[in-house]
Image (tube, helix red, strand yellow):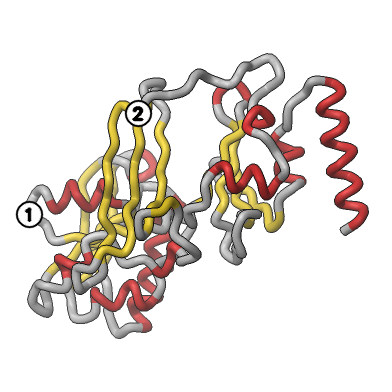
């Protein structure tokens, strides 16, 4: 541990002396459990007791470093844990952007099967074209230590009210679920992101239903639903799959049910 602290101190001193900001490689060197993904990296979030690589790390336009914790930790908390400032995420020649204005705010209420509000997932769209997702629970930012995998599926309260044997489609994310619900299709959405998996307790609302899994048209999305399928089988639920064919990477064409 001592050699690591000396390395980080020397690295930061060099950045300060030369005017350079943190590079992606240097940032990854400060994180634990780093894994390379198809787009960017995942790692253990330094601002909470992370066991499932909740942190997404990537480089954005112009070399800006991007950090996002799927468990709900704020960017400020992550930077404090890494002993960094916001300016360290920008290349030396790039100035931090002006304060962004929220152009659109969408709040998704995550409720238990009983209807009780558990958390709110906010989607913020800014006037510079960027977006951000935030968790709020009991009026405070973040999830207060609750693991995102333990959150109910989005729409659980509606599924709990339908008869056994009813068709329920499982999608990745709230937006896809609302699109189906707007067309009269009973659906729930996962809230963990593709890298996470809802807990068995979160999936119990699907017991006794005719479950169809609808993965996003990419490998992380299919792996996400495969893990859900395995947990559903353990709950004596035999889900079917909605697969897409006829287009590149499964993104177009006609859907077909399997299972």
Rendering coords of residue 12 (x, y %): 82, 35
User: Considering depth in this image, is 6 or 234 the residue closer to the camera?
Assistant: 6
Residue neighbourhood size for the residue with mark 1, other residues' Cα within 10 Å, grouped as few (<14), some (14–19), many (≥20): few
Q: Is residue 131 left or right of residue 43?
A: left
Q: Is residue 259 visible?
A: no
| Residue 199: quarter of image | bottom left
Q: Secondary structure at mark 1?
A: loop
- Front-most of residues 163 and 88: 88
| Mark 2: few/some/many CA within 10 Å (<14, 14-19, 20+) | some
* Residue closest to the eye, 180 or 83: 83
Pointer 1 residue: 184
What residue lies at 32% left-to-right and 54% top-to-bottom?
Answer: 120
Residue at position x 28%, y 59% from top? 110
Residue marked by disc 2 = 102
The answer to whether 206 is drawn above or below residue 66 in the figure is below
Q: CA distance from mark 2 to mark 1?
A: 31 Å
Closer to the eye: label 2 or 1: 2
Drawn side of residue 139 relative to residue 158, left or right:
right
Residue 162 picture location, percent across and down: 9, 72
Q: How many marks?
A: 2
Q: Which numbered disc flags the more N-terminal residue, 2 or 1?
A: 2
């Amino acid at each position: 541990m001592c050699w690591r602290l000396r390395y980080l101190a020397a690295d930061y001193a060099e950045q300060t002396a030369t005017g350079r900001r943190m590079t992606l490689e240097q940032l990854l060197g400060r994180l634990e459990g780093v894994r390379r993904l198809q787009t960017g990296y995942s790692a253990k979030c330094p601002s909470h007791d992370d066991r499932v690589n909740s942190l997404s790390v990537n480089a954005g336009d112009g070399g800006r470093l991007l950090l996002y914790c799927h468990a709900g930790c704020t960017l400020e908390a992550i930077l404090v844990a890494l002993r960094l400032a916001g300016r360290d995420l920008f290349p030396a020649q790039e100035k931090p952007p002006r304060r962004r204005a929220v152009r659109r705010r969408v709040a998704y209420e995550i409720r238990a099967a009983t209807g009780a509000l558990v958390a709110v997932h906010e989607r913020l769209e800014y006037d510079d074209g960027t977006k951000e997702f935030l968790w709020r629970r009991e009026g405070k930012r973040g999830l207060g230590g609750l693991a995102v995998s333990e959150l109910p599926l989005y729409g659980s309260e509606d599924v709990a009210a339908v008869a056994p044997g009813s068709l329920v489609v499982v999608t990745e994310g709230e937006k896809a679920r609302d699109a189906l619900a707007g067309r009269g299709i009973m659906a729930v959405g996962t809230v963990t992101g593709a890298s996470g998996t809802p807990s068995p307790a979160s999936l119990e609302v699907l017991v006794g239903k005719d479950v169809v899994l609808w993965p996003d048209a990419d490998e992380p999305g299919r792996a996400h639903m495969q893990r859900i399928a395995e947990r559903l089988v353990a709950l004596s639920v035999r889900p079917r799959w909605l697969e897409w064919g006829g287009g590149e990477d499964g993104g177009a064409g006609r859907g077909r049910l399997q299972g």
